[in-house]
Image: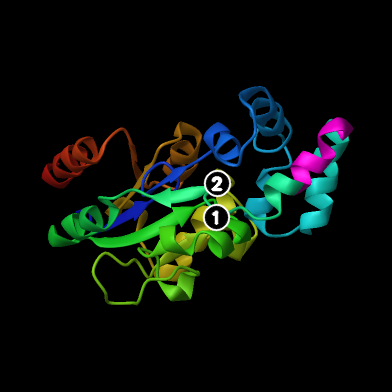
Amino acid sequence: MIRNVVLDIGGVLVDYHTLDYYMARGYREEQARALKAVTMDSPYWEFFDTGLMPYSWIVGKMKALDPSLAPWIDDSLRDQRGIVTRRKESKDWIEMIRAKGYRVLVLSNFSPAALLYCPEALDFLGENLGGTGKTGDYGVIAEGILSCHVHTVKPYPAIYAHLLTRYGLIPEETVFVDDTQKNLTGAGRYGIHTILYESREQVMDELDHLAAV
């Protein structure tokens, strides 16, 4: 029996902005693509989500990839306001899942900067997790794991172990919904059921199918 539904955040509950993030800040498309290549597409971006390395160290490594972009890197990452925005229907969807009797949690790679600079996008996330939602309010999730709090990221095994042990979840009773296959593969190794997110309707259909098995 499925009792727990664990939702990713980026690409599932919020839109995570990449090229459009830079263009919204006034950079031309060519500049935006160059910045995205040495920041979000670099191997150093993941360090933001682990919450381990100092901001200055991460940015320094990015600057070293292309020193000519150094001033723009500083300017674009110093204040990451607008890097995520909540999808309009997310809170309704959370309640729709709960209405079917499921416990709803989150499991997400997430950076301290996104928590700090995008409070308006995180009203579905409880204050105890770093969001702005009040526990018990409509559409608010107060249970789950954010990578920056446990200093490891999906798809590494430790983050799934944190989720299962902290909340006493039984893998066979748990479904993880994510928009990235490698993250689902990591969860599947623990025996957690997985759904690759394509749409809310598709996820609900697959949940109904799992419940009927």
Local secondary structure at mark 2: loop
Mark 2 highlights which residue? 154
Within the magenta stretch, is there residue 172?
no
The structure residue drawn at horizontal position 27% and vertical position 77%, both measured from the top left corner, is 136
Relative to 151, does residue 71 appear above or below in the rendering? above
| Placement of the N terminus among the 4 image quadrants | bottom left
Q: Residue furthest top?
A: 30
Tell me if label 2 and label 1 are in contact, CB under 8 Å: yes
Give the position of the C terminus as an image quadrant.
top left
Name which residue lies at 33% across and 48% down.
87
The chief SS type of the magenta part is helix
Q: How many marks?
A: 2
Q: Which residue is mark 1?
A: 159
Farthest residue to the front: give it: 26
Residues 91 and 185: in front is: 91
User: What separation in Å lies between label 2 and label 1 (alpha carbons)?
Assistant: 6 Å
Q: x and y percent of residue 75 in the render?
A: 73, 47
Residue 122 as seen in the image, left or right of residue 76: left
In the rendered structure, the answer to whether residue 178 lies left or right of residue 34 reads left
The image quadrant of residue 173 is bottom left
Q: Amino acid at mark 2?
A: Lys
What segment carries the magenta color?
67-74
Q: Nearer the viewer, residue 122 or 149?
A: 122
